[in-house]
Image (cartoon, helix red, strand yellow):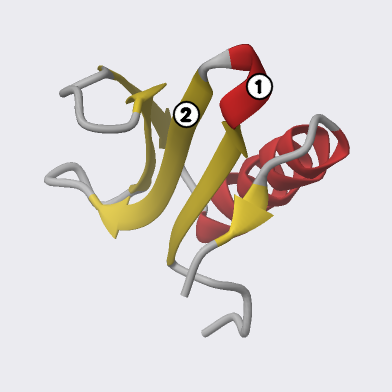
Amino acid sequence: MTREPRHLYIERREPDKNMARFYALSIEPNLFGGTSLVRSWGRIGSRGQQKIHVFDSEAKAVDLLLTLLRRKRSRGYRVMR
């Protein structure tokens, strides 16, 4: 089992630009014996959009999660607790 987060929620708020966005990442087992990375994003308070990536190993899902987290943090998203 890995030590990386399995569920992650980050936000970017910039009131002067009327920007309030969320981005959620979750690593979950799927029905086919593999692992899925579920990505959800949109404006805070809305349903947003969702995309599911299917992998044959958890390590690949964790790699994508960490890559997406680095990219979003460089754009101003902050981890919410």
Residue at (66% x, 22% y) in the render: 16
Horizontal relation, residue 15 to residue 27: left or right: right
> Which of label 1 and label 2 is nearer to you?
1
The disc label shown at residue 21, or none: 2
Say whether residue 70 is left or right of residue 16: right
Q: Secondary structure under badge 1?
A: helix
Q: Is residue 2 positioned above or below 50 on the image? A: below
Residue situated in front as seen by the camera: 16 or 79: 16
Task: Mark 1: give few (<14), some (14-19) or many (20+) Cα within 10 Å.
Answer: few
* Residue under the point 81% across and 30% down: 75
What x and y, as percent, mark residue 25? 44, 46
- Occupied quadrant, residue 59: bottom right
- Residue furthest out toward the right: 74
Circle number at residue 2? none
Confirm whether residue 61 shows in the render: yes
Label 1 belongs to which residue? 16
Relative image position of residue 73 (x, y in whole percent): 78, 44
Please tell me whether residue 71 is drawn above or below residue 3 in the rendered image.
Answer: above
Q: Is residue 65 above or below residue 38?
A: below
Hey, what amino acid is under mark 2? Arg
Q: Is residue 55 visible?
A: no
The residue lying toward the viewer, choosing from 38 and 17, is 17
Q: Position of residue 32 (x, y in %)?
A: 19, 42
Left or right: 17 as drawn, with respect to 28: right
Disc 2 residue crowd, few under 14, some 14–19, many 20+, Cα 10 Å: some
